[in-house]
Amino acid sequence: MADMPRKRGDSGRLLVTAGAVIAGCVVTAVVAALVFAPGRDQSPGSATAEAGQAVPVARAMTSSPPSGLRIPAIDLVTEDLVELGRTPRGVMEVPADARHAGWYATGPAPGEAGTAVIAGYVVHGYAKGVFARLHELRPGAEVVVHRQDGKQARFAVDRVETYPRDAVPEGELTGSTTGGPELRLVTCNGDYDPSSATQQYAVVVSAHLLP
């Protein structure tokens, strides 16, 4: 039987509270955090838009849940985004399978004022994940979020950053409700350590809403 989309993923966790860190990535039946491809070594670093480059300011959109995601630069098209809530421990749930990215529904919707968060896997259960090529994005790449109100929220990538999984800066994944409309796409990467069932790095793509 094919996996079905879920409204709430409860098979894993990604910290999103103040001082947020990615606790670890596993590739077992019970997921403890976001999962990423073993054997792909990407050391900490970043790709960032040129200093001084003007960033257009877009007017925030009204709130509407996302219904799909398209990133042409990495041939990503998905029409199923699951909703992710917060576990009793105060951490963000993760998608239940490799095919579905998830929107952190406790935070802003993509296009709304503040920072929206979408998380996904590189690989899960040995299946290729929806964010398998997320680390390939570069500044300027377009990210299109389809919304349930029929509108599109179009974003431009500002930076792609790789952190040690236990050293993601505070504020990157909190789903802030303040500030201009931004988007964070989150996954992990790096060598898989079977002894701890974790990967080394977190990958965070930051983007701003286009006018």
Image (tube, rainbow, N blue to C red):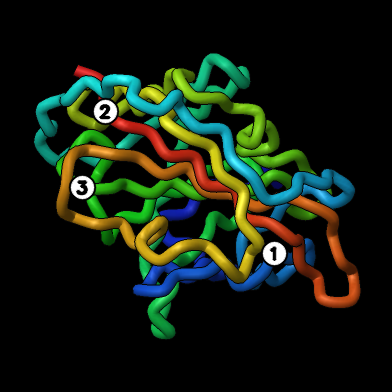
Residue that numbered label 1 is attached to: 25
Decide: few, some or many residues near mark 1? Use Cα within 10 Å; few <14, some 14-19, many ≥20: many
Q: Position of residue 74 (x, y in %)?
A: 62, 21
Residue that numbered label 2 is attached to: 209
Residue 114: numbered disc: 3
Q: Residue at x 42, y 39 (%)?
A: 206
Decide: few, some or many residues near mark 3? Use Cα within 10 Å; few <14, some 14-19, many ≥20: many
Q: Position of residue 104 (x, y in %)?
A: 36, 55
Q: Residue at x 40, y 66 (%)?
A: 170
Callout 3: SS: loop
Task: Choose between 19 and 153: the one closer to the eye.
Answer: 19
Discs 1/3, front: 3
Callout 2: SS: strand
Above/below status of 92 relative to 156: below
Q: Earlier in the sequence, mark 1 or mark 2?
A: 1
User: In the image as oriented, which residue stretches furthest toward the front?
Assistant: 52
